[in-house]
Amino acid sequence: MKIENLTRELLAAIGEDPKRQGLKKTPRRVEASYQYLTSGYKKKASAILNGAIFDEKYDDMVLVKNIDLFSLCEHHLLPFYGKCHVAYIPNGKIIGLSKIPRIVDMFARRLQVQERLTNQIAHCLKETLAPLGVAVVIEALHLCMAMRGVEKQNSICVTSAMLGAFRSDRATRSESMNLVNRK
C-alpha cells in the first residue's frame, strides 16, 4: 500500500491527475510491478536449488547461454536487459540446469548494477558447487543510458566474472568465450 500511495504522490508531483481515468489503477499496478521486479530480495539460493545438486563424475565445461535477463538499475530505477551466459567446470557435483536461470533471476530481481550482478551469480555457484571454475558473462542494454543522459540506444555493456580455472587457465577462458560467441 505504501508504494501505491507514493505513486499517487509522484503522479501529482509531475503534474498529472492521479484520479484521471487512465491513471486510477496505475498506483496499484506500479506497486504490483515493483513487488515482482524486486522479488529477488525474498529468495534464497538454497530454496531455489531445493536439493537439485547431484554427484556426477563429469569434469568438462557446462555452459548455459542466452539466459534472458531483466533488472533495474539502482541509480535511476530504470530497466536494463540482455543475456547472461553461465559456465562452470564440475568438481564431482552438477546442478539441475533449470536452476542456473533461476539463480540469475534471483539476483536480477533486485536493484542492481551489472558488475555486482555478474559477481553475485558467479560467487553463488562457486559457494554452492565448489566447482573447478565458474564464468559468468552478461551483455545488457541499460535504459538509463539509452533513453536519458547520453542517449546511446545501441550501447551494450559487457561484464564478466571468471573464477578458478576460468581465471587461471587462459585456454579454459578462451574455450568458454568461443562457446558463448558460437551461434
Image: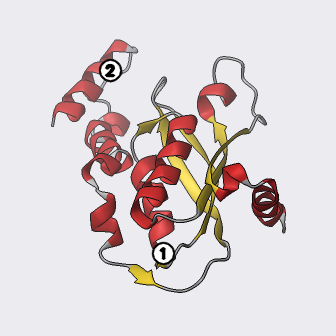
* Type of amino acid under label 1: Ser
- Residue 111, disc: none
Instruction: Give x and y (percent) for residue 64.
Output: 63, 69
Determine whether, in the image, residue 129 is placed left or right of residue 152: left
The residue lying toward the viewer, choosing from 40 and 134, is: 134
Identify the image quadrant of the N terminus. top left
Q: For marks 2 and 1, give the CA distance.
A: 39 Å
Which residue is at a point 51% across and 37% down the rendered structure image?
116
Left or right position of 93 against 44: right
The residue positioned 42% from the left and 49% from the top of the image is: 107
Q: Quadrant of residue 61?
A: bottom right
Q: Report which residue position mark 2 lands on.
A: 10
Image quarter (top left, top right, bottom left or bottom right) of the C terminus:
bottom right
**Type of the residue with mark 2:** Leu
Q: Residues within 10 Å of mark 2 (few under 14, many from 20)?
A: some
* Residue at (27, 41) in percent of width and height: 31
Image x and y of residue 58, in percent: 59, 83
Considering the numbered disc 1 on the image, is that residue within a helix, a strand or a loop? loop
Tell me the residue that label 1 is attached to.
98
Q: Which residue of the protein is positioned furthest toward the left in this rendering? A: 1
Q: In x, y percent, where is residue 45?
A: 34, 60
Q: Is residue 3 above or below residue 92?
A: above
Q: Residue furthest front?
A: 168
